[in-house]
Image (spheres, helix red, strand yellow):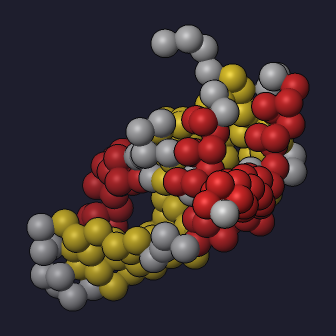
Amino acid sequence: MDSTFDLSRRRCHRLAGASLLGALLPALGACAAGGGVRTQLLSAQRLNQLLASQFPYTRSFGGLAELSLLSPRLSLLPASNRLATAFDLALVERLAGGRYTGGLDLDYGLRFDAPQGAIRMADARVNRLAIDQLPRAQQQLVSQYAPRLAEHLLADLVIYRFPAEQLDLARNLGLGVGALRVLPEGLQVELAPRGPR
């Protein structure tokens, strides 16, 4: 009786594991069977949803000013294997009580952060930073320092975080995240057998 129960329980665990595998990471099964590289595609729509869930993003600068980035709009740059994102921005100047709006556009590469199981921004470059109705005396300072500041603020921002279950299943099958490729239809994540350690 006990051995029959144990056998049934093991079968249930195997079935549950197989269901989880199929639901979470369809490419893994094929990868394990074929022993080669397989891919998972994150669509542009999905990437936009994931990015939007992290905004608005607000940063205070010593109580003197507060910058908020809003409404991110992600686009794909397959030719350069990069992504681009345009933001609305709001700047509140605490001393004088000024409130300004504008926009920020940047493009960036991607890197996989293995310990955190996340795909992050890398090598961000600001292409446009505009703040409407900013007094002329401050425009030069903004154009000189703000792009570098924005690149620093957004460095390493998480674009996608793999669920822990996905990563555990991949590790158990000897797979790891390889190349990240920006395609016209989305971000292709390569899943490949990990080399010997």
Q: Quadrant of residue 153?
A: bottom left
Percent x, y for residue 108? 57, 42
Residue, x 48% and y 36% (percent of image)? 114
Q: Quadrant of residue 181?
A: top right
Residue sitting at 57 percent across and 45 percent down?
Answer: 167
* Whole-percent x, y for residue 10 in the image: 67, 54
- The residue lying furthest to the top in this view is 196
**Quarter of the picture holding the N terminus:** bottom right
Q: Considering depth in this image, is 125 or 96 the residue closer to the camera?
A: 125
Left or right: 41 in relation to 123? right
User: Which residue reaches farthest front?
Assistant: 1
Is residue 119 visible in the rendered image? The answer is no
In front here: 115 or 149?
115
Q: Is residue 189 left or right of residue 121?
A: right
Rendered position, 102 above or below 166: below
Q: Farthest residue toward the bottom?
A: 97
Where does the image place residue 9, in percent across and percent down from the top left? 66, 61
Say which residue appears at 56% left-offset and 45% top-offset: 168
- Is 66 in front, or is 29? 29
Q: How many marks?
A: 0
Relative to 38, 195 lies left or right: left
Asked whether residue 18 is in view, the answer is yes
Give the answer, above or below, for where 25 lies relative to 47: above
Q: Nearer the viewer, residue 90 or 85?
A: 85
* Image-quadrant location for residue 59: bottom left
Percent across and percent down for residue 63 are 13, 74
